[in-house]
Image: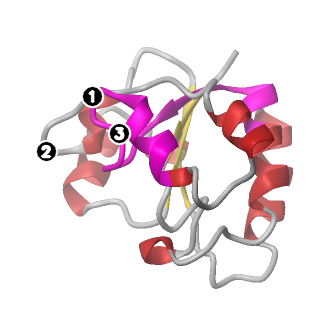
Amino acid sequence: MRKLYLDIDGVLLTTKGSKPSADSEEFIEFITDNFDCYWLTTHCKGNKNTALKYLGSYFSQPIINKLMQVKETNWDCLKTEAIDFSSNFVWLEDSPMEAEKRVLRENKVLISLIIINLNNPDELKQIQRRLMKIK
C-alpha cells in the first residue's frame, strides 16, 4: 500500500485552523481507507495524540476514529526528515519549504509532492480523483 504523508493546516483545515476544508470528511475517509497514512505536520512530532487532540474540536468522533489510523512521524527542522524515500509515497502539503523541495529533488521524488491550495474550488475532490489513479 502506498504511503501518504499528511499535513493538517491548509490541507484538512483551512489555514490557521479556522475550519475544516470543504469535503475534508469524505477525503479523510478515502485516504485512510486507501493509503498507509502518516502525519507530516507541526501538530505531530513523535506523538499523534497531539494532532488528534487538535482536530477533535473540528471533526466528529467517527472521523477522529478514522484519523486514529494515521501514524505518527518525527522530524526536527525539515518535514522531509520523516519521509521514507525508499517507499512509494505521496506528500500532501499546502506550503512546502524550498529546502524541503530541494531534498525531494535530490532524491528524485519531487513528483510525489502534491501541493494543496484550498482556494481552488473543489480542491480536495480534485486531489482525491488524482489519488484514485495512483493508489
**Does residue 100 show up magenta in the picture?**
no
Q: Is residue 24 above or below residue 89?
A: below
**Does residue 42 show up magenta in the picture?**
yes
Residue type (three-letter) at the residue carrying disc 1 = Asn
**Residue that badge 2 annotates:** 77
Residue drawn 22% across the image and 33% down it: 75
Residue drawn 58% across the image and 50% down it: 56
Residue at disc 3, secondary structure: loop
* C-alpha gap between disc 2 and disc 1: 10 Å
Highlighted range, magenta: 31-54
Q: Earlier in the sequence, mark 3 or mark 2?
A: 3
In this view, the mark in front (3 or 2): 3
In the image: residue 91, left or right of residue 28: left
Specify few, some or many for label 1: CA neighbours under 10 Å numbering under 14, 14-19, or 20 or more.
some
Residue 66 horizontal/vertical position (percent) = 72, 33
Residue type (three-letter) at the residue carrying disc 3 = Cys
**Residue that badge 1 annotates:** 74
**Residue that badge 3 annotates:** 44
Q: Earlier in the sequence, mark 1 or mark 3?
A: 3
Depth check: give the residue in front, 22 or 91. 22
Residue 60 horizontal/vertical position (percent) = 75, 51
Residue at disc 2, secondary structure: loop
Disc ID at residue 61? none
